[in-house]
Image (spheres, grey):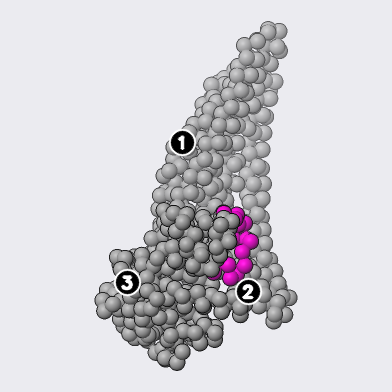
Amino acid sequence: MTGTAAGSKDNSGREALRRWARPARRAMHYGLVLQLTGIGGWIAMAFGVATLVGGAASGNTAHHGLLIALFGAFARAVSGWFAEGQLSLAGRLMVSQARAEILRGVAERGPGWLSGDTHGARTSQIIDRTGQLHGHAARWQPGIRLSVAGPVLVLLAVATQSWLAAALLLVSVMVLPVFIWLTASGTAAQARAQQSALDQLSGDFQSRAAQSGLIRSFRAVGRQSEEIAARSQALRERTLAILRVAFLSTAVLEFFTSVSIALVAVYVGFKLLGIFPFATGETLTLSEGLAALLLAPEFFAPIRRLSSLHHDRTDAAAAAGFLAGWLSHRPVLATRRAWLEQAPLIIFDKVCLEWPDGTIGIEELSFTARPGEITVLTGPSGSGKSTALLALLGHVRPLAGRICVDGDCFQGAESLADSAAYIGQAPWLMEGTITENISIASPGASREAVARAALTAGLIDDAGRQSDELARHLGRFGAGLSGGQRQRVALARALLRQAPLLLLDEPAAHLDAAAEGEFMALLRGIAPGRTVLLATHSPELKAAADTCFALTTGPAEIVDA
């Protein structure tokens, strides 16, 4: 990556962090105020204890010191509890804002925007990388402000007791910014590498899990397990590298802190004993010296936390840099055509298609899909069958050639999504009743309309309709249905939507021969009045089609059906 590109990516990442942090600002400010209140509680505790001990040493009872200390302890505990809640809320708000922006982009631009990486890697990026933003709002932003405001507040309190003790604390803290900068320069690149390793592991694991049956069939379990183990080892090494820096930086910071507090303790002790070798221009009492000693650790407490908080910053910056770069590549939105009143005639004439990431999906594609017919696109994997279907939904952009619908050709990126129903290899199902799963296609549809669609799709029969089979509750991802029943749910959705264009991508991939025949018979029954375009490898589906086009690296060839 060139210096200019890296700088541009950093700038876009910083802008994304500011944008996502806006909804969390109020909670961050409240949390910071509460944290400062907690420091004020510690100051009250220090003064109260010092007053109580000093009075006891001089033979006086200073009960008001005990009351002040108790009040400070109560204020610190309560403010700390509320501050934790506010800052946790700030972190959640920032993560929610980032995820909402990403999901909004997916909803507006379609799933083609997610191309360019594996499903597992994209899932990791949307969930895990956005999760890294939580620490930015919940810990880093308030922590960096507290590391300035908190010590100043404590320093003023120490100065009221001993100006030289305050000066010692101020001088000792001057070396810490240089140390923090050195830590920052060493962890940013490691955080980016660790997150990339996590993306790679997530992508590899998802792809292996999806192809587990094929891996077992070819007896490649051992080899694939070794590759996953290698990815896991790489992630472990990246994580340990970050932890090494974290532990080392914490140890060094603790050393500086301990030396600084020791200097204050030596000065206070020698001053109280009257053996300090230099004149300081101040008289130190037991109460004042004890208060300064009790406040010294609190002076360094916010600064000591910066070492760990900095890793929240680097994680968030690495995540934002990647996500902002991804979000900046926004494909042109496809113009949605109005609802088609009848089944369309679709013509692809030497079409070249481009994915949102700029890769060419297919070249020189030509075929015709007629109303009332089942048109099949077949060909080897990667020949562009699915890409052709997605082009009609606006997820892939035509670069050359013509896509015409009833003689009206696409002008740039256009979409028939409002008039189409799409059925993939594994229809998405949710936990809930069968009725709820079908109603996704038309949320306002009546129960009678849902039942008719399910009956036509062969999901239920008249007996099942009477026994309210549609009220059966499904588990997560539709657990409880066979592959054929899942496809019938998808078909029922298409019927409920009453779309004149039906697009199917390998609908029989997970069906046995009997279920495949039944599904094709159902398609035959609903084809009149619709344009059915189907991408498949199945010889049975190809044989049952009205027209079949074989896709190759060149123009599609007509195969007799």
User: Which of the numbered marks, if any, corresponds to residue 179?
Assistant: none
Which amino acid type corresponds to the residue marked 2 in the rendered image? Gln
Position in image of residue 110 (x %, y %): 42, 65
Q: Can you tell which of label 1 and label 2 is closer to the viewer? A: 2
Q: Nearer the viewer, mark 1 or mark 3?
A: 3
Q: From the viewer's perspective, is the residue at label 2 or at label 3 nearer?
A: 3
Residue 344 seen in the current view = yes
- How crowded pointer 3 is (Cα within 10 Å; few <14, some 14-19, many 20+) is rated as some
Name the residue that disc number 2 marks.
211
Q: Give the amino acid at mark 1.
A: His
- On the image, the x and y values in percent for residue 197 come to 60, 65
Distance between mark 2 and mark 3 Cα atoms: 40 Å
Image point (62%, 61%), residue name: 479
Cα separation between marks 1 and 2 = 49 Å
Q: Earlier in the sequence, mark 1 or mark 3?
A: 1
What residue is at 44 percent from the left and 62 percent from the top?
496
